Amino acid sequence: MVRSKIAGIGMYVPQQVFTNQDLMKVMDTSDEWIQERTGIKERRYAKRTGETTTTMAVEAAAIAIERAGITAQDIDFIVFATLSPDYYFPGCGVLVQRAMKMKEIGALDIRNQCSGFVYALSVADQFIKTGMYKNILVIGSEKHSFGLDFSTRGRNVSVIFGDGAGAVVLQPTTKETQGILSTHLHSDGEAAEILAMYNPGTHANHWMQQEVATFNDGNLGDMFMSHAMIDNAQNFPNMDGPSVFKKAVVKFPEVIMEALAANQLTAADITMLIPHQANLRISQFVQQKLGLKDEQVHNNIQKYGNTTAASVPIALCEAWQQGKIKEGDLVCLAAFGSGFTWASALLRW
Ligand code: ACO
């Protein structure tokens, strides 16, 4: 039986550290509020110029490729998860293909926000299992710092997010005791707007309960992104934090239990849970609900904030680098985020 294994893993975070105290200089917030509600002490921000979602991805990918013992020319497919692409289109996958001088391989971008990496891994897993590809580069990367409202108006969102990238190389294995055992993907679009960035977009207020922008009917070019949208701060992410929290603490445990049940395993069998780093309080709640010990869960949101699609591969890479994950260990990846979408992957390292 062919399964996919993680043959190499890499991560990259920008050098520039932004502490809660740094944020207090630009908005009305406090270290106490941020740490108490989210666990975050600091996050990394990419250089204003010279570092993009793609360049960070390339840094992480180069490490993953080297650790897999192959070269960039051996990669035969790219799956790239991000909500903060270099361009609205084309996606970042092709930019990685160009930057790393790869062959004319397929490149696919995934827009599933916080669960993007687990979705990307699941897509890549199917291609490996069918035998279509042998070396798939799966990336999660985000440059949030370019798209946040750093005034007090945007503080409930902007204090949470950070920049960074993580990448893995997936390869086939026939080893019984290794590889991805299962992935489970879910969505519920009922509350899509409560964690969303509305503009630029083509919705023209179609889905909104209330008017979110004043359009100039005479100017067709205004619809996608207008001065009014910018004046009303509608080009920034919007989040109803408490509603997201309530849903996350239900769906995280659910999708982890689903993965365990599908493989006749229990929470006690998990060597390492890598939860998407949404909020330390959410991770702690999930840990408690599943009865996991501290050494069974890896959190690093304290240092990096929420890096959305990059958070799972960064945390996985860091846990592995710290020697917390060894060959044959049972690792569970789980994520929940905007959409809502949520997902899990269970694998033997
Ligand atoms: N600093 C100081 N005060 C703030 C800040 C801030 N950065 N942000 C909001 N506040 C204020 C609010 O204005 C409000 O003031 P008021 O009571 O005078 O009106 C008060 O703090 C409480 O606001 P709430 O939004 O109710 O605060 P809550 O306790 O729910 O915490 C938080 C907010 C941290 C966003 C929380 O709801 C949460 O973690 N939700 C989950 C969402 C999440 O994890 N998002 C991550 C991205 S999505 C994902 O990855 C799943």
Image (cartoon, grey):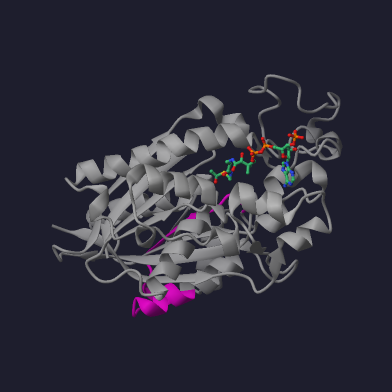
- Image coords of residue 278 (percent x, y): 54, 49
Q: Can residue 302 be seen here?
A: yes
Q: Nearer the viewer, residue 199 or 255?
A: 255
Q: Is residue 279 above or below residue 179?
A: above
The picture quadrant for ligand 1 comes to: top right
- Image coords of residue 180 (percent x, y): 26, 56
- Image coords of residue 227 (percent x, y): 86, 38
The residue positioned 29% from the left and 41% from the top of the image is 257
- Span colored in magenta: 62-84
Q: Can residue 102 be seen here?
A: no
Magenta highlight on residue 66 = yes
Q: Is residue 17 left or right of residue 184?
A: right
Quarter occupied by the N terminus? bottom left
The residue positioned 25% from the left and 52% from the top of the image is 268
- Image coords of residue 330 (percent x, y): 26, 59
Q: Is residue 167 above or below residue 241?
A: below
Magenta highlight on residue 123 = no
Quarter occupied by the C terminus? bottom left
Q: Is residue 194 left or right of residue 30?
A: left
In which quadrant of the rendered view does residue 210 lie?
top right
Q: Is residue 155 above or below residue 211?
A: below
The residue positioned 17% from the left and 59% from the top of the image is 2
Q: Nearer the viewer, residue 337 or 29?
A: 29
In which quadrant of the rendered view does residue 92 lie?
bottom right
